[in-house]
Amino acid sequence: MAELFGYTACRQLSQMFISIIFFHVSEYILALVIHGKSNVSLKSLLISRHYLLAMICSLIEYLIELYFFPGLKEYWWISNLGLALVVLGEIIRKLAIVTAGRAFTHLIKVYHEEDHQLVTDGIYRFVRHPGYCGFFIWSIGTQIMLCNPISTVGFAVVVWKFFSGRIPYEEFFLKQFFGSSAYEDYMRKVPSGIPLVK
């Protein structure tokens, strides 16, 4: 068993746990700083049953493959690519949060509030939904980092499906808040940030 948890497993699993802890704690801290303690709940940690189930399944896949196919985990260029994607996704998402400020919330706004402005500068000049884009890259990166082929595909499909439904729903309200023609003009100029989602 000690041989099973050698350098490779220790490095990959510690990178995974550090990535997860950093992502969720930094989300919560930024929400506190931007929105204030009275407007933030533990939901800002962004941990749901489905998310926990996905992460547990990815760890089960990792351990099974580590036991039966240990060589699969030794492709360091793949693992390092995953780590780079995790860092890139984290940067994109945090830039989205900081740039949008109070306009960035974890829940879709269905009523226009006074301080809710359409943000089109900073990272929003290049990506319409950088928060979603960052999470998409980050989540897939965690699985590439673990050299988990099944979970990499699974995460990509599930997260893409989630955002492909969420983006049109959110943009329905954004068009109402900021004017259909103005927002549609922004949509034409700037990609959503999620592949195949216009």
Image (spheres, grey):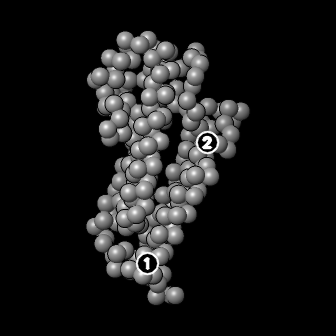
Compared to 184, does 151 lie above or below? below
Quadrant (top left, top right, bottom left, bottom right) of the C terminus: top left
For the residue carrying disc 2, how many other residues have a C-alpha within 10 Å: few (<14), some (14-19), or many (20+)?
some
Relative vertical location of residue 153 with respect to residue 121 in this rendering, above or below: below
Image position, residue 179 (x, y; %): 44, 11
Label tally: 2
Q: Nearer the viewer, mark 2 or mark 1?
A: 1
- Disc 2 is placed on an element classified as helix
Q: Nearer the viewer, residue 176 or 186?
A: 176
For label 2, the residue is 44
Residue 154, how many percent across, how many down? 43, 56
Give the residue number, with chain letter if any, for mark 1.
Answer: 66
Q: Is residue 3 above or below residue 155?
A: below
Residue shown at 34% from the left, 56% from the top? 84
The mark nearer the N terminus, 2 or 1, is: 2
Residue in the picture at 28% in, 23% down: 189
| Cα distance between the residues tagged 2 and 1 | 33 Å
Q: Residue at x 36, y 18 (%)?
A: 184
